[in-house]
Image: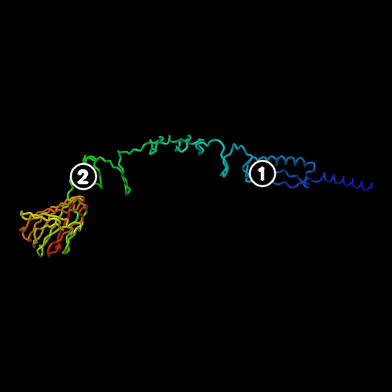
Amino acid sequence: MIKNTVISFIVSVITLIALVNMPVHYLSLSSPNLGALALTDIQSTDTLSDFPTVQNANNTLIETVVNSIIGTTTNSTITSLTGLTTASALVSIGTITTGTWNADVLTVSFGGTGSTTLSAKQILLGNGTGGIEVVAGFGTSGQFLTSNGNAAVPTWQTSAVDTTIDYNFTSSIFNIKNLFASSTVANPLRFNGVSYTFPSSANTASSTVLTNDGSGNLTFNTPDWILLSSTTTAQTLAIATSTIAVAQDIHIIYYQPTVWTTNSTLKMTFNDNFPSGNYGWMQMQNGGVATQNANRNEILLQVAATTTQPYVIIDIANLATKRKVISFTTIESDLSSSIGAYTSGAGIWDNSSEAITSVQFLTDGGSLIPSGTIINIYGR
C-alpha cells in the first residue's frame, strides 16, 4: 500500500514538472484572422506561465473589434439595426423599401415642400428655395387661372377676349350661337375673302331680302324673280307638267316653237287637279267683248281653236290658304311678223287648302304640245 502511494506521488511530480516546462502552443489552438482582427500567436518558446499575458491581450483586442462591428454599418452581414436611434454622420442608405417617416419637415433644398400641411383642393405654386405656396382662393364658376406676367402669381379672373389681335380658327366647324357683329365700311364682315357691309337698320318688310351691289355693300330690297323650273319638251306631249317649289308669286312664260297642226286651244291646270270643275275664267280677244265661264275643268288661255302659234305670259297669286288668282296674256301668230290675235284674261282656281306645286299645259283639239316647247316658271 505504501509502495503504490509513493509511486503515484512520484508520477504526479514528474507530470507537473513536464507541464510547467512544456511549450504552451501544444495547449492552444492556432489563432484565426477575423478580417482586421490580428491575434498574438503563442510562440514555441513560451511557457505555461506566459499564457495569461498573451490570452488577456487577445481578449482585449477581440472585445475592441466586436464593439466596433456593432457600431458600424459597413459590415455586409448587418441587415437590421433595431436598436439604432442616432446616426449623426449618415451619408447614404440606398433604397428604403419600408418604414414610416416620423421626423422634421423635409425642406425645399432637399426635395421637400417645407410644409406640414397643404391647403385642401388648392393649386400649389413653386417658391424657389422657400416653402410651397398656393393660388389665392378658388375663384368663381367659369373663371380662368390667368397669368399676371413674368414672375407674378397667377390669379382667378373672368375671361376676356383681346379685341386688338387677330385670331385664326383652323377647325373644320366653328359654331356660334348668337353673333352680334358690327359691320361698317371701315370694318366689314369677311366671308371667303369677300368683304360685306351691312345696312345700319333693318327693313321690317317680310318680303325684302339683302342684295349685294357687286362691291360688298348690302341693302334690303324686294327680291327679283327666281327661276323655279325650266322645261323644254323633247317630244310631243298630251300634257306637259312642270313641278315647282312653293312661292307666293308665280310668273310663267310659255313659248311654243310651231303652230298647232289642227285647230286647237291651250289650257292650264294645277297640281294635277283635272278634271275638277273648280276653275273659272274670263277673257277678251283683240279688245272685243269679254267671255267668261265658271265651274270649268281648266283655264282656257285662247279664245278659239286655231292653227296659230301661242305665246303666253301668266302671273299667279299663290297663297296656300287663299283662292288662286291668275292673270294672263296670250299672243297668237302664224309664224310671220303679223299677230293673229291678242287675248287678255283672268282666272280663278277655287282651292284654298294648298299652294300650287305643279303646272300642267294641255290642248283642246287634235294637236299635242309640240317638241321644243319652252316652259319657264319663276317665283318669289
Splitting the image into 4 quarters, where does residue 82 fall?
A: top right
97 or 175: nearer the viewer: 175
Circle 2 sits on which residue? 206
The image shows residue 220, relative to residue 280, as above or below, that is above
Can residue 380 be seen?
A: no
Left or right: residue 64 versus residue 219 is right
Mark 2: few, some, or many residues within 10 Å (few <14, many ≥20)?
A: few
Circle 1 sits on which residue? 36
Residue 357, percent from left and from top: 21, 55
Q: Are marks 2 and 1 in contact (CB under 8 Å)?
A: no
Image depth: mark 2 or mark 1 in front: 2
For the residue labelled by badge 2, is the local secondary structure a helix, a strand or a loop?
loop
The image shows residue 213, relative to residue 339, as above or below, that is above
Residue 244, percent from left and from top: 21, 55
Image point (7%, 54%), residue name: 290
Can residue 105 be seen?
A: yes
43 or 103: nearer the viewer: 103
Mark 1: few, some, or many residues within 10 Å (few <14, many ≥20)?
A: few
Distance between mark 2 and mark 1 Cα atoms? 110 Å
